[in-house]
Amino acid sequence: QKRNPNENEFHQAVKEIFDSLVPVFAKHPKYMESGILERISEPERLITFRVPWVDDNGKVHVNRGFRVQFNSAIGPYKGGLRFHPSVNASIIKFLGFEQIFKNSLTGQPIGGGKGGSDFDPKGKSDNEIMRFTQSFMTELCKYIGPDADVPAGDIGVGAREVGYMFGQYKRIRGGYEAGVLTGKGLGYGGSLGRTEATGYGTVYFVQEMLKDAGSSFEGSTVVVSGSGNVSTYAIEKAQSLGAKVVACSDSGGYVYDPNGINLATVKQIKEVERKRISEYVNVHPHAEYHEGCTGIWSIPCDIALPCATQNEINEESAKLLVANGVKAVGEGANMPSTLEAIEVFLTNSVLFGPAKAANAGGVAVSALEMAQNSMRLAWTFEEVDAKLHDIMVNIYKSAVNAANEYGYPGNLVVGANIAGFLKVADAMMAQGVI
Ligand code: NDP
C-alpha cells in the first residue's frame, strides 16, 4: 500500500496470488529467503508516455499510453493492449501481474506484460482510430520487438487496431517483423483460431471442470456477460456443445432471450455495425433489454461465464448466482470476480475456473501465432484449435494437481496460482538476483 498508493486493482491481484502461495513458502523456504515475492511484484519496467492526436474537427487531444514489462524470466514480455477510459497504472499493473502466471500456465516460453491507453474508442471514426493508434505506436515501437515484447489486443483493441499499429511499426522500423504483434489479420501473419481462442478456451476449461464432476454443457442454461471478442466466442462454443445461452450484455445493459441468444444478431450488431447490445430487441422483440450490466447475474443459470471486465461480480451478485443454483463459473474476463465473490463460490462448492487459467487460451494461441511467424508457416484452423484444446486440458490438470499437492483439493484458484508461480520463480532463482 505504501509503495503503490491508490493502486486498488493491483493490490487485489497481488493479494490473491500471495494468499495462495502460503503453503508453497511453508514447504520451500528458499523462495522467501531469495526475496522472490518482493521481486516478482515489482515490474521490471513501467513505461508511460504522451499520445497526442487530432480528431476529425482538427481538435488536439492528449491521452496517456502505458506498457508494463513485468517479468521476462521465461520469455519475452507478452500481453495485450487495452483502450478504455478507465485505464491507469493500477489497471495495467494488475493485468501485467496476472499475465505472468497465466503465461507460465500455458507451458509456453512467454513472460508477462500489458499495456494500453485511457483513450475511449467509442464513437470515434475509423480515421480517428487510425490517427490515435499510429501516434500510440510511434512511441511504443521503441520498446517492443518479436524477441523482446509482443503486444496483442484486449478491451477496445481488435483486428482493426492491431492492423493500424502493425502498419505504423513497420513504417517506422523498416523490414517485416511479423512476430511483433499478435492478433493480426489473416492476410498478413495472423493465426487462424486466434479470434476465437479466448472464448473457446474458456469453454474448454469449464468443460473439463464439468467432466470431472460428471456433468457437461449439454442441456445447461448459461449466462455470458459482455458481447465483445471473448463473450462472442464463448457463446459460440457453449452453444455448439448443446448449451442454451440466455443472456449477454455490454457496459450499458443486458439482454435476456429465453429462446437462447441469436449469435448472428450479436455479431452483426457488435462486430459489423459497432452498435449497442440494446439493438438486439429491435431484431428479436420477444427478448428483454435491461439497463445496467450487473443485473445480468440475477438471471438463473447453471453456468456463468463473466467475459466483460474486472470486478463485474461482487459478493452480492455471487450470492444471487448461488441462490439461483449456479453449478460452475468460468472467468473469461480478467479478474471479473471480487475476492469476496470468489469466497462465496468456493464456500458453496461452485466449480470455479479462475481467469488466469480459464482465459489463458487467447495468449496461448498468440504464442502459436508467434511460432507460425517464426517458421513462416500457417497452420489450419483445426490444427490450432486442437492445440488450444490440449493446452486448456493441460492447464486444468496442472491446476488440479498443484491444488491436490499443496492440500487444497478442488481449489483451482490456489492450484493455478501455485502452478503458474513455481515455473517463473524457479527460472528467476536460476538467473540470480534479477
Ligand atoms: P472487447 O472490447 O472485445 O469486449 C469487452 C466487452 O465487455 C464489451 O461488451 C464491453 O461493453 C464490455 N465492457 C467493457 N468494459 C466494461 C465495463 N467497465 N463494464 C461493463 N462492461 C464492460 O474486449 P475482450 O472481449 O477482448 O475482453 C474482455 C475481457 O477478457 C477483458 O477482461 C480482457 O482483459 C479479457 N481477456 C481478453 C482476451 C482476448 O484475447 N481478447 C484474452 C484474455 C483475457 P462496451 O462495448 O459497452 O464497452
Image (tube, rainbow, N blue to C red):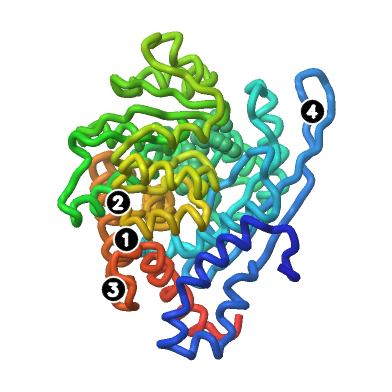
Q: Secondary structure at mark 1?
A: helix
Give the alpha-carbon distance from disc 2 to disc 4, as whole Å.
Answer: 43 Å
Q: Secondary structure at mark 4?
A: strand
Residue at the spot x=28%, y=34% of the render? 221
**Residue that label 2 marks:** 205
The answer to whether marks 3 and 2 mark residues whose Cβ atoms lie closer than 8 Å is no
Instruction: Please rate how many residues cluster around mark 2, counting C-alpha atoms within 10 Å: few if below 14, some from 14 to 19, many from 20.
Output: many
Q: Position of residue 66 (x, y in %)?
A: 69, 51
Residue at the spot x=28%, y=36% of the render? 238
Tell me the amino acid under the disc marked 3: Asn
Q: Which mark is residue 54?
A: 4
Which of labels 2 and 4 is toward the front?
Answer: 2
**Residue that label 1 marks:** 395
With respect to residue 141, does 13 lie above or below?
A: below
**Residue that label 3 marks:** 404
Q: Earlier in the sequence, mark 2 or mark 4?
A: 4
Tell me the amino acid under the disc marked 4: Val
